[in-house]
Amino acid sequence: MSPRAAWRLESMGFGEVYEYAAGLQDWITAGLPTEGTALAETRAGDVARADVSTCRLHEPLVEVRERTRKAGFDTCVVVNDERVVFGLIRSRDLDGEAATAGEAMRPGPSTFRPNVSAAALARLMADHDLPNVPITTNDGRLVGLLLREDADRVARERHDREH
């Protein structure tokens, strides 16, 4: 919001008011709420699974595998205490011989922002045969995991609306 609006809210008794200076694109990229018809397309952050299985670098892989599969996922996102993404452990890596999550993970996975079109990611995931992709904020914090089946569903719904 503008500095004038922030000062006006403070004058009305609101205690913690901040000027957001990064701009609209950063706001949208962070997955924050938007209005207007131009932004009505379903975005990756809208359908990413926030309840995805996560683990820490030093966790035993046996425990990670059990927890991940029990939660219904075949991928675990390796994060730190601030939920910054370090890597992914996909299904075949969950079944590997590594002792810890850090040893089993694929470091530095490609991540996508919440504002990216879910339908566009469906095409990318199909082209690269990816079962899922991590959705993160600009500073690398996990928003969720976009499953290919969810992205495909959004793409089909969009196609049906347009045709």
Image (cartoon, grey):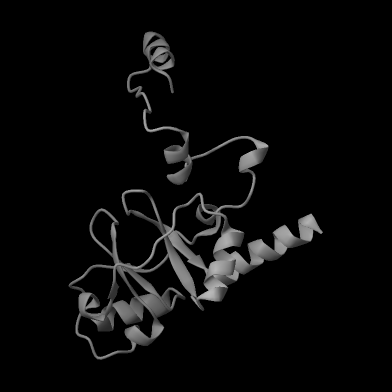
Give the answer, above or below, for where 87 lies relative to 80.
below
Quarter of the figure with residue 10: top left
Q: Quadrant of the N terminus?
A: top left
User: On the picture, is 48 further left or further right than 102?
Assistant: right
**Whole-percent x, y for residue 153 in the image:** 65, 66
Quarter of the figure with residue 6: top left
The answer to whether residue 150 is visible is no
Depth order, front residue of 112/79: 112
**Whole-percent x, y for residue 60 in the image:** 21, 79
User: On the picture, is 94 further left or further right than 134?
Assistant: left
Depth order, front residue of 143/155: 155
User: On the picture, is 19 further left or further right than 127?
Assistant: left
Q: Residue at x 36, y 72 (%)?
A: 76
Give the answer, above or below, for where 36 lies relative to 56.
above
Depth order, front residue of 63/26: 26
**Whole-percent x, y for residue 121 in the image:** 54, 63
